[in-house]
Amino acid sequence: MVSAFTQWTLDVHDVDRMAAFWSAALGYRIDRGDDGDAHLWPPDGGLSVWLQPTDVPKKGKNRDHPDLVAADEDVEAEVARLLALGATRADVGQRGDEGFTVLADPEGNEFCLLHRR
């Protein structure tokens, strides 16, 4: 018997803003909860995202983060699209020769866009 990933949960300050960003970034449908949270559902039934409200500030670099890939494999275009949605470039000590681009969502949570699958 083993466990399987089913959901990525992220504590956020502004659920509406973060739901808008992550749903646009991933192409997921937003399902708003009654207690201020939001659940994001993928069109294919894969890994979902749950955004739960918090007042706790983020401190330092995330110890875990999602890795994304550009569906059409155009990394430069996908970086530009994510930046236009509200992401920012993040420096977590990378050297510049990595096979990924480090970005942060509108609340500063780091994620990577892999250059290859």
Image: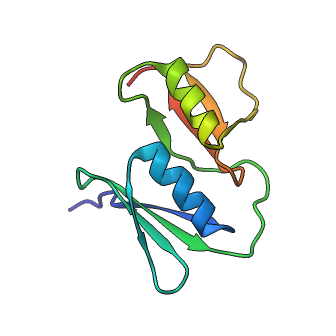
Q: Which of 110 and 93 is in front in this view?
A: 110
Query: Could you tell me residue 109's position as x and y percent?
Result: 66, 50
Q: Residue furthest bottom?
A: 34
Q: In this view, does 108 lie to the left or right of 112?
A: right
Q: Residue furthest top?
A: 97
Q: In this view, does 69 lie to the left or right of 5?
A: right
> How is colour applied across the structure in the image?
rainbow
Q: Is residue 19 above or below residue 25?
A: below
Quadrant of the rendering where the N terminus is positioned: bottom left
Figure quadrant of residue 48: bottom left
- Circle count: 0
Figure quadrant of residue 15: bottom right
Query: Could you tell me residue 113's position as x and y percent?
Result: 52, 31
Q: Residue furthest left?
A: 1
Q: Is residue 108 above or below residue 100?
A: below
Query: Could you tell me residue 50's position as x and y percent?
Result: 46, 66
Q: Is residue 43 left or right of residue 98?
A: left
Figure quadrant of residue 96: top right
Residue at x-position 62% and y-position 36% = 84
Quadrant of the rendering where the C terminus is positioned: top left
Residue at x-position 57% and y-position 36% = 82
Residue at x-position 51% and y-position 52% = 22
Q: Is residue 32 above or below residue 72?
A: below
Q: Nearer the viewer, residue 100 or 89?
A: 89
Residue at x-position 50% and y-position 27% = 78
